[in-house]
Image (tube, grey):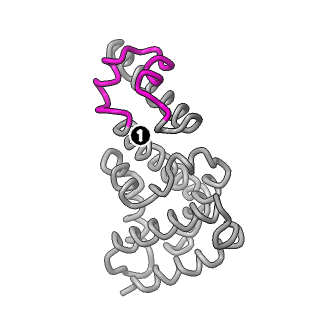
Amino acid sequence: MGKVDENKKKKKEALFNTAYELFTTKGINATAISDIVEKAGVAKGTFYLYFKDKYDIKNKLTAFKTHELFEKAAKALRKADISGLEEQLIFIINYIIDALASNKALLYFISKNLVMGALRSALLTEPDFYEEFLNLVNEDSYKYECPDVMLFTIVELTGSTAYNSILYNEPLSIEEYKPYLYRTVRLIIASHRQ
């Protein structure tokens, strides 16, 4: 990578990091593009080279943070050496829930967007997690009908219910809710077996 490309990468990273910091401390509505570029130390024109507006950077950050979360969970899974699709998915879900419970700023930022839409947009840029998911499905002793639908259902359920349990203890605290969630995830997985 040449010096010009490296400089562009640093500026984009500065914009990303600064926007995330401001969005999680001030809020999206209270953050202006001028706030982001000033704090990042770049020109306003540089911002528009990479992003249409602050909602575009927010959407790209959501996809990036979602992807990052799933990648960390997949990496932890590889180290844990757990077999069987059901146990592997429960491990990943538990990892993500614990990560969000310990980083409420990230949970607020992602909001209820830890859903398949955000995951899918993250997967379009770097499909590593999705490929790993398909490998898990293919390596399992069972065959599954519509693995995409199964993943969609699990991600949607986990994202929305974990959000409420972590932030509002509704219907229960997240630790009390986990056994119910995991039982439901196991039933979803079983219902997709051929």
Q: 140 above or below 1? A: below
Name the residue at 50% across, 27% down. 18
Classed neighbour count for the residue bearing mark 1: other residues with Cα under 10 Å, few (<14), some (14–19), many (≥20): some
Q: 97 above or below 84? A: above
Q: Position of residue 154 (x, y in %)?
A: 46, 71
Q: Position of residue 113 (x, y in %)?
A: 45, 55
Which of 175 and 34 lies nearest the eye of the viewer?
A: 34
Residue 182 visible to an observer of this rendering = yes
The answer to whether residue 106 is left or right of residue 14 is: right
Name the residue at 39% across, 53% down. 118
Which residue extends farthest front? 30
Residue 88 visible to an observer of this rendering = no
Which of 78 and 183 lies nearest the eye of the viewer?
A: 183
Question: Which residue carries the number 1 mark?
Answer: 58
Q: Position of residue 96 (x, y in %)?
A: 57, 57
Residue 109 magenta: no
Q: Which portion, as a residue range, is magenta?
A: 30-54
Name the residue at 48% across, 57% down. 112
Q: Element under label 1?
A: helix
Q: 147 above or below 70? A: below
Instruction: Give the amino acid type for the residue marked by disc 1 in the picture.
Output: Lys
Picture quadrant of residue 91: bottom right
Q: 103 above or below 38? A: below
Name the residue at 44% across, 48% down. 67
Q: Quadrant of the C terminus?
A: bottom left
Which of 141 and 43 lies nearest the eye of the viewer?
A: 43
Q: Position of residue 127 (x, y in %)?
A: 35, 51
Residue 39 magenta: yes
The answer to whether residue 23 is left or right of residue 51 is: right
Secondary structure mostly seen in magenta is: helix
Q: Quadrant of the N terminus?
A: top left
